[in-house]
Image (tube, rainbow, N blue to C red):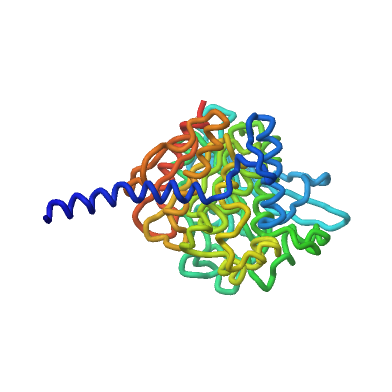
Amino acid sequence: MMRILFLVVTWCLVVFPKLSHAQDVQRLPDPLLFNNGKKVKSAKDWERRRQEIRETMTREMYGAAPQQPKNMRFEVFDLDKNALGGKATRKQVTIHITEKGRQAKFDLLIYIPNQAKQPVPAIIGLNFIGNQAIHPDPGIKLTTAWVENSRMFPCGADGRATDACRGVNASQWAVDSILARGYALVTLYREEVASDRKAQAFQTGIHPLYPELQQREDNFGTIAAWAWALSRGLDYLETDRDIDAKRVAVFGFSRLGKAALWAGATDRRFAAVLSNESGAGGGKQFRRGVGEDINRLCTAFPHWFARNFAHYRGKDSELPFDQHFVLSLIAPRPVYLATAEDDKNSDPQGEFATARAADAVYRFLGTNGFPDGAFPPLNQPLMGQIGFHIRPGGHDVKMFDWIQILNFSDLHLQK
């Protein structure tokens, strides 16, 4: 009798997870169906459907963004060819934008590996507390924007960056490993682009350049603003002869992972997208009802998304889209979703389900999509055109994450 019970339980553990994944996919909106119910049958059809998806998600979730600025200039204010003990060339660049007499600016920090053949591929990503925090290099300019002081991001208690802030976030940026693999690293600070504080939302950075976009229900949200700035960083990289701008991946962690995904979805110039624990509004499905939901996002972070998104509070299962639509906009370019076992808000199972649901679009477009199989064990990455892993631990960026991200990047970006 016990043996029969054991066999039944084992069968359930094997079969029902597979069934649940299939059911998740079946009840999600289909990216390969037009809004009128017609099926996408050709590459030409997909281009029209892709535009339909982008318009829907812009209007209902992320908000409208401006076009590439006509009045933008790049100021290279630092060039050190012997940075980090000779391992890298450090460049620092201010991006200046003028719009109808209004001005904004933000800085790029760039490390280029000296031992790699140029032009090199690059990884660009936003950081949480200033460029000076990703490495103790004393040559990095201290940001003049507000910086937070928290357990995860310890910095100036009065909101100002000081020398004490240098390198305090270095554990999340594997600078030496990135350079050793032959990639340039490019980063910019979120607060210089758009404030992440509710009280200051839309008042600093680039938002004051476009006041007309804040008068709409599909207003220019902060996630969209960060994504837009990543594209402006790529604008600069297209002018830098040391960088191969056709091999630039966009990276982000947590809320900045949400921005990286949207940047990849809206700007096809990014060759790959690397998202680490982006969770709700990033890689995870809303329909699962696990982790952060729309009500939580719109209450705690009302500035992140367009005002239209708040209409879906309490209606997570009624969205006319879900986050597999974002991955579908990225397709057929490679995208990686990194997750962690104890990061319940980000719902690792939900990110896996999103990757699985986007597989059909990737395969329709001729790639190998997402590897078949059940949810993987810890520390066992899946590597297709869509990649995924789950590691032990919580909400963070660990060396294990970077190793897998770089392995994935090597598959898709290295010549």
Is residue 225 or residue 27 the one in the foreground? Answer: 27
- Give the residue displayed 58% in from the left and 49% down from the top: 29
Q: Please tell me whether residue 153 is drawn above or below residue 326 in the rendered image.
A: below
Name the spot of residue 148 as percent of width and height, x first: 57, 68
Is residue 354 or residue 21 the one in the foreground? Answer: 21
How many badges with numbers are in the image? 0
Q: Please tell me whether residue 91 is drawn above or below residue 140 in the rendered image.
A: above
Q: Would you say residue 180 is visible in this rendering?
A: no
Q: Please tell me whether residue 179 is drawn above or below residue 146 in the rendered image.
A: above
Name the spot of residue 269 as percent of width and height, x first: 65, 36
Q: In the picture provided, is 178 more to the left or to the right than 215?
A: left
Is residue 117 or residue 208 the one in the foreground? Answer: 208
- Give the residue displayed 45% in from the left and 39% down from the top: 406
- Give the residue displayed 51% in from the left and 54% down from the top: 285
Query: Which quadrant would the N terminus be assigned to in this image?
Result: bottom left
Name the spot of residue 374 as percent of width and height, x first: 36, 44
Q: Looking at this rendering, what residue extends furthest in the top direction?
A: 415
- Give the residue displayed 63% in from the left and 64% down from the top: 312
Which quarter of the picture shows residue 405? top left
Q: Would you say residue 166 is visible in this rendering?
A: yes
Name the spot of residue 61 as percent of width and height, x first: 66, 57
